[in-house]
Structures are given as C-alpha cells and as structure tokens.
Amino acid sequence: MKLKTKRKIKRFVSRLLGLLLMIAALIFAYYLGKFIETLITITVFYIYRHLFEKQWHANSMYMCFFVTTVVLIVLINIQVKISISILASVIMTFLLTLISYYVRDYMDSKVLNKMYRNKLDNINSKAIENLSEDELINVLPSIKYETLHIVYEYLHRDKSTMTASGFAYRNNISEATLYRYVKQVKEKYESLGK
C-alpha cells in the first residue's frame, strides 16, 4: 500500500475517532445534565487552541483518543451548571489549553536541551574555529544562518590576503558589524559549554 494512501486512511480514521468521541462526550454530558456546558467547552477549546503556538499532542492516535476521553470525562464531571455560571466552562477550557501549552513547551525545552548537549558531546568541545559550517549551524540554531555563514567564512578566510575590513566590505557590512557578529557567535558557543 502506498504511503499516501496509508496517510489518507490514518487521517480518515483519526477524524472518525474524533467525531465519535465528541458525539459520545455530548451523549454522556446529556445524561449528566451538562449538554450545553460541554458543547460550550468543546467549541471554545477549538477556538482557544489557536491562541497558543503549540499544544501537547500524544505520540499515537490511540493514545490521543485515550487522553482526550479521560480529559473529557473529568471536564464533564466537574463542569459548573450554566445556570450558575456560563464563564466557568470558558475559563476551565482556557486553563486546559494553557496547561497543554506549558506541557508541550516543557517537553520541547527538554528535547532541545538534550539535542544541544548531544551535539556538544559529538563535537568534543572543539574550538569554534575547528567546527565545520554545518556543525556551527546545528549547534547554534538560535542565530540566523546568514550571521553564522559570515562568521564561518571570516574565521576561515586566508588571513594573509584578506583583512577584516576587506572581508566586511566584500560582504556589504561594516567592520563593526562583522566584529559584533563574531562576538555574538563566540559568546553563544562558549555559553553552551557551561
């Protein structure tokens, strides 16, 4: 079976499971007398999740289905009746998406820190001048590619034929900007080893 066909099937199954879960949640909420509250929660969730740049997602479709089921059951059970407060559903949903954002952010930072450490270990604490351009780009992803490229070229220029001012002129930047780039890259690289 082609990969494209498998993806279409997986997307269809995922959407079908999502739809079935929402219908089941609304039926469950109806029997608990919290249909409107749950409908508001589900609607507001889809609005709120676009307020944040990222959200926690399970690694597999089935794990996502399981976690969503548990979260919905808990939310439906702790919902405050709409006759008491319509804002409770809105605030509770906001808190859920906020928690989901921070969980994803925490997981991302752990992964990035581990990646940086692995990259640094693989480089064996080389002097910055001994790094290849690819290593420099991989180790310092927070610095713009153009800046890293200029610094790499500057550090590896033929010093007997090219002065710093000549190099800066050739790259259409001032000598001060060149030195600022070099300082920025060196400081960032040194901070990774601490």
Image (cartoon, rainbow, N blue to C red):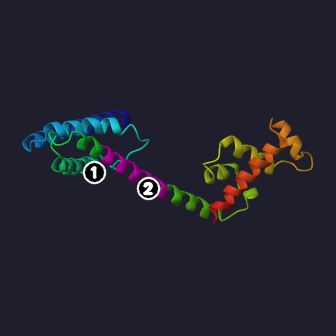
Q: x, y percentage for residue 109?
A: 48, 55
Which residue is at 71% across, 51% downward?
184
Label ID, residue 63: 1
Amino acid type, mark 2: Tyr
Location of residue 168 by image quarter: top right
Q: Which residues are magenta?
A: 94-110
Residue 117 in sight from this viewpoint:
yes
Question: Does 132 sit above or below residue 93?
Answer: below
Relative to 55, say whether 194 is above or below: below
Magenta span: chief secondary structure: helix
Q: How many marks?
A: 2
* Most foreground residue, 39 or 14: 39
Circle on res. 106 = 2
Task: Give the Cα distance between marks 2 and 1.
Answer: 19 Å
Disc number placed over residue 143 in the picture, else none = none
- In the shown orientation, is residue 21 left or right of residue 101? left
Work out which quarter of the rendered image holds the C terminus and state it: bottom right
Residue 156, image x and y in percent? Answer: 80, 50
Which x, y percent locates residue 3?
Answer: 37, 37
Q: Quadrant of the N terminus?
A: top left
